[in-house]
Amino acid sequence: MNLIDQNYKLFLKEIKSKIKSSQIKASIKVNEELLKLYWDIAKMIVGKQKESSWGDNLIRQISKDLKLEFPNMKGFSVTNIKYMRQWYLFWQKSPQLVDEIFKIPWGHNREIITKCKSMDIALFYAQKTVQNGWSRAVLVHQIEGGLYQREGKAINNFEAKLPSPQSDLAKAILKDPYSFDFLTLREKHDERELEDALMEHITHFLLELGSGFAFVGRQYKLIVGGDEFRIDLLFYHIKLKCYVVVELKTVKFKPEFAGQLNFYVSAIDGELRESQDNPTMGILICKSKNDIVVEYALKNISNPIGVSEYQLVNKLPKEFKSSLPSIEKIEAELKNLEER
């Protein structure tokens, strides 16, 4: 088919007019207007392809002509116009959701439609991007790490122990499992090694925990009635306005772990919580768990607690240590050598 005919020229003129009109508005709202432009172009192309026999030849011809007409504008390659069309077809059945996707950059939109299998999953990542200001690299990491499948899935007693809507917000911050793919540990690592590694990669750990977590302290010291206790990790959640106690266990969940964490949560409430703070939450992250055992263990626990597993992708051989000797060990060895 010969595209260079009067019909095509009129059609191309409509697109050029749309682009020129958009250029004026783009100086005010660059990203949103650019995406609206892409949406309109894709809509026009899909409509024209439905009413005529024009196939991919149309996209190739449009790409060529638009690059000639607008040499200083990027985004009119054949590949990108095909992405526009794919993006429009992906979302066109739910026009009420379109405003959400106009809030995130085009590169993010491309990643979402090519990596997400359903509209629900895609919308989840679009909303998370808006809420958290994710870069494209972080967005891809979260999609490939299966955040949608893991978020809000941990066993917890929040609904029974927290008022609504705080209970729903609290459930949403939990993941199961937590992915510690940024760590490399030996298979039989202990809790101190896991804690050391997480603190060494605290930025990645906070990213995995999710938006809103502010780090308070590690091995946080609590004095209760003259006795000293140490909490593995203590955070404050800015959105929930509460302290969050995180305990790490490198073994399978045991019912007594819930009791220990319950005590820590009560102690933070009694010793640290201020009048403006909401009730403290506890998160237990263990190597594995039996879900039925966890449910029974949390049934009569007085404080809001959630239990999750963690996963490691990179493991060292069992006999290989995952960390160098501590300063104390080195000093002890040197002292032994001096005394000989």
Image (cartoon, helix red, strand yellow):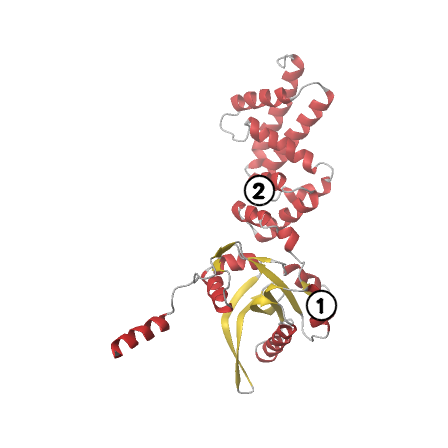
Which quadrant is the N terminus positioned in? top right
**In the structure shown, which secondary structural element does the residue marked by tag 1 occupy?**
helix
Task: Pick out the residue farthest to the front.
Answer: 319
Disc 1 and disc 2 in contact, CB within 8 angstroms: no
**In the structure shown, which secondary structural element does the residue marked by tag 2 occupy?**
helix
- Amino acid type at circle 1 is Glu
The residue lying toward the viewer, choosing from 215 and 104, is 215
How far across and down, in percent of the image, does residue 290 sit?
Answer: 67, 64
Badge number at residue 337: none
Q: Name the residue under label 2.
A: 108
Look at the image and tell me whether residue 211 can be seen: no
How far across and down, in percent of the image, does residue 76 sit?
Answer: 55, 28
Q: Name the residue under label 1.
A: 295
Query: Circle 2: is it few (<14), some (14-19), or many (20+) Cα within 10 Å?
Result: some
Find the distance from the CA under tag 1 to the CA under tag 2.
39 Å
Residue drawn 54% across the image and 27% down it: 77
Look at the image and tell me whether residue 188 can be seen: yes
Ranked by sequence position, the earlier of labels 1 and 2 is 2
Quarter holding residue 309: bottom right
> Viewed as shown, does residue 2 lie left or right of 327?
right
Residue drawn 66% across the image and 61% down it: 154
How far across and down, in percent of the image, does residue 206 sit?
Answer: 53, 59
| Numbered disc total | 2
